[in-house]
Image: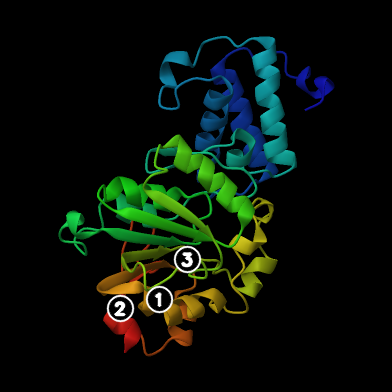
Amino acid sequence: MPDSAVSDCPSLHTLRDLLRYAVSRLREADVHFGQGTDNAWDEAVYLLLHSLHLPLDQLEPFLDARVLEDERKHFLMLLHRRCNERIPAAYLTNEAWLQGHRFFVDDRVIIPRSPISELLTQQLEPWVPDPTDIHHVLDCCTGSGCLAILAALAFEQAAIDATDLSADALAVARQNVADYGLQDRIRLHQGSLFADLDPDSRRYDLIICNPPYVNAESMRSLPQEFQHEPELALAGGPDGMDLVGTLLEQAPRYLKDEGMLILEIGHEAHHFVAAFPDLEPMWLATAEADDQILLLTRSQLVS
């Protein structure tokens, strides 16, 4: 934000002042949420606490604390970019939070928000009766590596493979894997789905995948915030099922006999049913919805 614009706000002295102002500006700009927060208040609180290097869960003790001039200018600059350039907050702060875990992000990857994360923190109970039975996990379309990392944390004895077509995305994933000290358990592979894997050397108890599934019509009407994310990680073809079809066809070769596939398809359930009418998946409910994630066993995929 230009200095002249910042100087127009000299009366914003405290965190309370800045939060009120930020909520007003976010609502006035009609920004789109859904990439970490879902409302103006939470977005404003996050940006302010992050910019001031304060704990993200401790707003109340600091509400009436006065801010320094450079602190105010820095926060107002972030707010200006959020409102005027529609840059998602996660790209402004280079971090995203998922199930209480922090991940480094930038515009080389989509912002972590997959509801598969909720299921992983529950160790896929009750579909995985004994978490110690999970020895090999594959995360296709890993992006930032967040789901691969959460899988490693959920299944502590498992070796994790993670694939992505984008070398840029894998660079981000590599940083996150290193941040969690999981280099010995998570192997990153560049290639589309299974291209860099050998089914004769390793098959998987569990494959998870959050593929590009946004249909062409929806891609054309994406809010500006989502247009900052890599198109490669979002666009799924005319009905969103282009890569999903390839995944379903190839997955049985890489699954163990009792293995299963956990697949996210977002708001494309009707397109999935239309494209694969003979499949009868189990739909897994999360806090967000009950028709965005499905489970298929190897036997179902083979038949």
Label count reads 3
Q: Is residue 11 above or below residue 135?
A: above
The local secondary structure at tag 3 comes to loop
Q: Find residue 94 and report its image quarter.
A: top right
Q: Earlier in the sequence, mark 2 or mark 3?
A: 3
Does residue 12 lie above or below 151 as drawn? above
User: Which residue, given by chain and number where applicable, does mark 1 sit on?
Assistant: 251
Q: Earlier in the sequence, mark 2 or mark 1?
A: 1
Residue 266 is situated, as x and y percent measured from the top left of the image, at: 47, 66
Q: Are marks 2 and 1 in contact (CB under 8 Å)?
A: yes
Residue 46 percent across, percent down from the top left: 52, 31
Distance between the alpha carbons at the discs numbered 1 and 3: 20 Å
Q: Is residue 197 left or right of residue 29?
A: left
According to the picture, the residue beneath numbered tag 2 turns out to be 298
Secondary structure found at label 2:
helix
Amino acid at pointer 3: Gly
In this rendering, which labeled residue sits more in front, label 1 or label 3?
Answer: 1
**Cα distance in 3D space between marks 2 and 1:** 8 Å
Residue 278 can be seen in this image: yes
As helix, strand or loop, the secondary structure at mark 1 comes to helix
Closer to the chain start, of discs 1 and 3, is 1
The quadrant the C terminus occupies is bottom left
Q: Relative to the observer, which residue lies in front, 234 or 157? A: 157
**Amino acid residing under circle 2:** Arg
Residue denoted by label 3? 266
Q: Residues within 10 Å of mark 3 (few under 14, many from 20)?
A: some
